[in-house]
Image (cartoon, grey):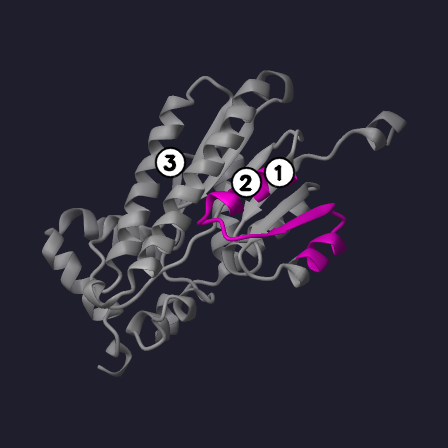
Amino acid sequence: MTVDELKAPRPLTVVTGASSGIGYHLAKLAAEHGHDLVVAADTPLDQAVSDLRALGARVDPVQADLASTDGVQQLIACIGEREVDVLMANAGHGLGGAFLEQDFQAILHVINTNITGTVHLVQHVGRQMVRRAHERGAGRILITGSIAGFQPGSFQAVYNGTKAFIDSFAMALRNELKGSNVTVSCLMPGPTDTEFFQRADMATTKVANDPKMLMQPEDVARVGFDAMLKGEADVVAGWRNKMQVAISKVMPAQAVAEMHRKLAEPGSADK
């Protein structure tokens, strides 16, 4: 290795929702590929930061609520003037239960985390990537959507609606950026063995309690990371989830909603 190579800056990756689950494993993959990191989450990042630094990465953590403009601005301030090579916009959370019984502030928090904060960050970083792509080569954006975006989500109506937006947004942005040397990929997981269901108050649902339905977060992250490196448009993680998407595209919407109800209705684990 030459002196110039030793001095060369490492690529910088920004990962949101990086304290656990899919986001944590996306950050690990970036560190294993020789990237430095800015990681963000609304929960403590100490363990994730320790693990990532052990892999040789410089890591700057931001614990902030990315549902708020202030939280996104904290992350943007941490990035500063540094050039971002990869953005993995993964932050998001769910909200189970009947829509009319949900607290409206909780509903807004889901919308603002999954949509508003994501769009805000992607626009800021994406503008910088496009300006500098001709100097630095390809910029890469990976947005975590969901197969839920294809399904009317009975007892998860707001979450599924936000993911329908995100899936569509990612594909539209990818098309807009054709020729810019910046690629946009959309990772669409299905049910995954993370803290998602506990945080979404879905612990008594069938989907949260059926191990056969749950993928491991490290496997989901690998599928998304590899698709991003290849510049693919979108990827559904797991054969079972691919089947779910195919079924959702051909069945009547109300039949899909009824199918979703059987998985997500509170107490369905006991039925």
Q: Which residue is labeled 3 in the image? A: 170
Furthest-bottom residue in this view: 270
In the image, 110 versus 159, the foreground residue is 110
Alpha carbon distance from label 1 to label 2: 6 Å
Q: Residues within 10 Å of mark 3 (few under 14, many from 20)?
A: many
Residue 77, numbered circle: 1
Q: Nearer the viewer, mark 1 or mark 3?
A: 1
Helix, strand or loop at disc 3?
helix
Q: Are there few (<14), some (14-19), or many (20+) residues within 10 Å of tag 1?
A: few
Q: Check residue 75 for magenta coloring.
A: yes
**At label 3, which amino acid type do we have?**
Ala
**In front: label 3 or label 2:** 2
Task: Give the x, y percent position of residue 99.
Answer: 22, 62
When the figure is inspected, residue 96 is found, relative to residue 242, above or below; the finding is below
Q: Which residues are magenta?
A: 49-78
Coordinates of residue 79 in the picture (x, y in percent): 63, 37
Alpha carbon of mark 1 to alpha carbon of mark 3: how far?
24 Å
Lower sequence index among marks 1 and 3: 1
State the residue at coordinates (67%, 31%): 82
- In the picture, the disc for residue 25 is none
Label 1 element class: helix
Return the residue at label 2: 73
Label 1 with label 2: CB-CB less than 8 Å: yes
Q: Is residue 220 magenta?
A: no
Dot 3 or dot 2: first in sequence order is: 2
Residue 268, placed above or below residue 83: below
Residue type pointed to by label 2:
Gln
Image quarter in which the C terminus is found:
bottom left
